[in-house]
Image (cartoon, rainbow, N blue to C red):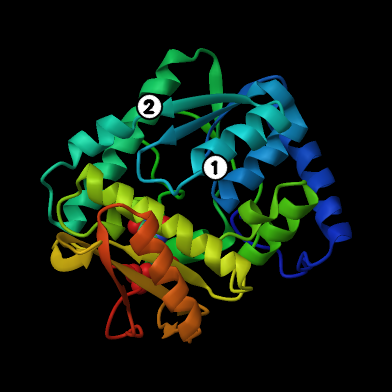
Amino acid sequence: MDTNKRPDDMARITTPELAQAFIDEQIKDIREQVKDGKVLLALSGGVDSSVVAALLIKAIGKNLVCVHVNHGFLRKGEPEQVIEVFRNQMDANLIYVDAADRFIDKVAGVTDPEQKRHIIGEEFIKVFDEEASKLEGIHFLGQGTIYPDILESEKGIKAHHNVGGLPETMQMELVEPVKLLYKDEVRVVGKALGLPDNMVFRQPFPGPGLAVRCPGAITRDRLELVRESDAILREEFAKNGLEGKVWQYFTVVPDFKSTGIKDGERTFEYPVIIRAVNTTDAITATVEDVPFALLQHITKRITTEVNGVNRVLFDLTPKPSATIEYE
Ligand code: XMP
């Protein structure tokens, strides 16, 4: 039997009851597969790895070892939330690795977007591998592979990092409890597992994170401006009923400064670009019609609260001609 094929008669998980039945079955299957062995999991805090972590915690408790690598390009509050939810609330065995300086040093001066992505991806595996080699007796690797990852890999659309992307040296058996689920089903299961809504329903976020929203060579100051302005944008979208309605929204800080004026003094500071788009498949996207008054309010907040920004722009471009991200 091809275990990577979703059975034709598998019902779509749409209700808490169906999610619970799936959870019970997976707990049984995980225990059968792993027995009293240990499972290692890279926990990013994204929907898929968070749901896999919560399932594995239920099934094997402390025999799951979660590693959360903070590569320095996470959104404001993300690493803290992972620690709060998994270590404090679910009592998980969680290793938190603050590797921010290491990653930022590695990409210093790198302007090519593909090279940037490559360096971040490679460094991530290195850090994870280093943590894994400090642990003994781990024979299983948990992964948040979902069904679209398998389908896209099979069609050759993209070599998904969750499918066949393991470093050669990591000879571990995979544990992939949500690999036959679609994204909407993973969310229903996550909710049934008690994960917070802002984790279960969060917008897509690229693996290299804020690094691709800091076009050109990344500097610590611009990275901080992206993080702070993004936090304000998310807060205002949540307050104004746009969270969950708009597919993806974020800020970008380009690599140039412009002249402005603050408190009667000339300034020479960075702009912040706001992007807010809707799509179903991320292949094409339209721009959200954000109320002008809200844009003005967000502009006011960003230019007064984020030190080093004197201008806010709104990106009016659909995909195509632009992509959703800037790099
Ligand atoms: P683009 O910019 O290509 O983005 O229009 C389409 C969608 O993919 C997300 N994206 C990524 N996701 N790793 C990811 O996991 C990446 O390197 C990556 N690059 C783009 C992007 O956020 C958007 O939702």
Using the image, determine if residue 271 lies above or below residue 160.
Answer: below
Three-letter amino acid code of the residue under disc 2: Asp
Camera sees residue 32? no
Is the CB–ligand 1 distance for label 1 below 8 Å? no
Question: Which element carries disc 2, helix, strand or loop?
Answer: helix
Q: Position of residue 156 (x, y in %)?
A: 37, 66
> Which label number is shown at residue 143?
1
Residue drawn at the location 26% of the way across and 30% of the way down: 102
Image point 10% across, 45% down: which residue?
A: 109
Tell me what residue is drawn at x 54 percent, y 14 percent: 137
Q: Based on the displayed image, in which of its 4 quarters is residue 61 positioned?
A: top right
Q: Is residue 136 visible?
A: yes
221 relative position to 52: left or right:
left
Q: Quadrant of ligand 1?
A: bottom left
> 274 or 155, which is in the foreground?
274
Left or right: 163 with respect to 56? Answer: left
Counting from the top left corner in percent of width and height, residue 123 is at 28, 36
Provide the residue designation for mark 2.
129
Q: In the rendered view, tell whether residue 81 sits above or below residue 263.
A: above
Occupied quadrant, residue 7: bottom right
Judged from the image, the secondary structure of the residue bearing numbered disc 1 is loop
What residue type is disc 1 on? Gln
- Indicate which disc residue 276 carries: none
Q: Residue furthest right?
A: 17
